[in-house]
Image (cartoon, rainbow, N blue to C red):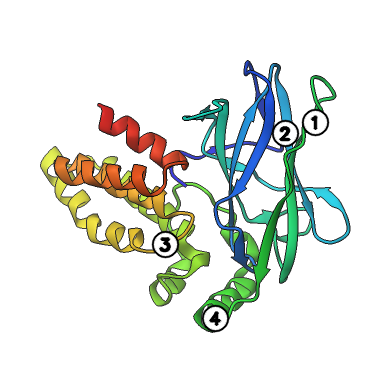
Amino acid sequence: MSLMLRLCGVLLLAGMPSAPIEVRAVKPTLLVGEPLVLVVTVTTNAPIRLKLLVDRGRGFTAYRGKPFASGWQEAEGRGGGMRTEYVLSYDTRLGDWLFAAPGTYRLCVESEDPSPGPFRSKTVAIGVTAPTGGEKTVHDALRRMGPQLLDVHGAHRLGELGALVQRFPDSAYLQEARLNDLNARIAEVARSPAGPEVVREQLAALVPDVEAAARVPGPFQPEVLLVLAALHDEIGHKPVARSVYERIADEFPDRDAARLARRETRQ
């Protein structure tokens, strides 16, 4: 996702009024190996550290991997608190995807500190199904290349995933990779020593690819739309940018992308 911050192992929160931890899976039914996007909201009186627990049928165990999140921001609306979004795909404890086989999994978020907690969120159920058709082709290719290829959560070119994205651009497995690639390509243009007019032309040339990615529904769609709006803004299409920001706020009101979109429309 764009604007990602690496969070190693645990999360540290501070200075918030008391309330429980709330967790929501953006997409509660996934394909085997598909990345999971979680929205986590926390309020507490003192700093706490959090960990993700996953039950694969034999009790809860701690997720071990590279947690990535959008960064803690004030939660808008009733209840307040702080909110972040995780993207989770690869569990180093397993050496495999977080959900590597079909079934129903349970997960929750728990505080690690004994005081003022411990707090634990309610359990969230995740249904995981086997891929079919084109998604099975993508799944099998990813298995051969290595499941850790989906464990990239920031601006990054597609590399060996490029051929898969070209063949299966709408695959649920590949939407974060498309987003990462678009962010990397935009960053490359922004770093170009070319003059402002040339840079605008190069950014405008990226619009069709971003529009194509933004048409694919799923957990990463609001982030791609946010990239699209920012791109139109940068090349001077202000009314188009505003309409995309408004769409994000209307269609995805409780996602972090909507908070950023609302901030842009207020400026």
Secondary structure type for disc 2: strand
Classify mark 3: helix, strand or loop.
loop
Vertical position of residue 134 compared to residue 81: above or below: below
Determine which quarter of the picture holds residue 111: top right
Q: Position of residue 250 (x, y in %)?
A: 34, 45
The mark closer to the camera, 4 or 1, is 1
Mark 4 highlights which residue?
137
| Residue 149 x/y as whole percent | 58, 61
Percent position of residue 251, x then y: 37, 49
> Is 261 in front, or is 187?
261
Q: Tell me the crowding category of disc 2: few under 14, some 14 to 19, or many 20 or more residues within 10 angstroms, Cα based.
A: many
Residue 138's disc is: none
Asked if labels 4 and 2 touch by Cβ distance under 8 angstroms, the answer is no
Amino acid type, label 2: Leu
Identify the element where label 1 is drawn.
Answer: loop
Of the two numbered discs 3 and 1 on the same chain, state the one appearing first in sequence.
Answer: 1
The residue beneath circle 3 is 217
Report, in whole angstroms, how far the alpha carbon at label 2 lies from the one at label 4: 36 Å
**Separation of disc 3 and disc 4 at Cα?**
20 Å
Q: Is residue 102 visible?
A: yes
| Residue indicated by mark 1 | 112
Seen from the viewer's position, the closer of residues 174 and 159 is 174
Q: Residue furthest right?
A: 58
Q: Is residue 131 above or below residue 204?
A: below
| Residue count near mark 4 (Cα–Cα under 10 Å), binned few <14, some 14–19, many ≥20 | some
* Residue drawn 28% across the image and 59% down it: 211
The alpha-carbon separation of the residues under discs 4 and 1 comes to 40 Å
Counting every numbered tag in the picture gives 4
* Mark identifier at residue 50: 2
Q: Is residue 41 above or below residue 66?
A: above
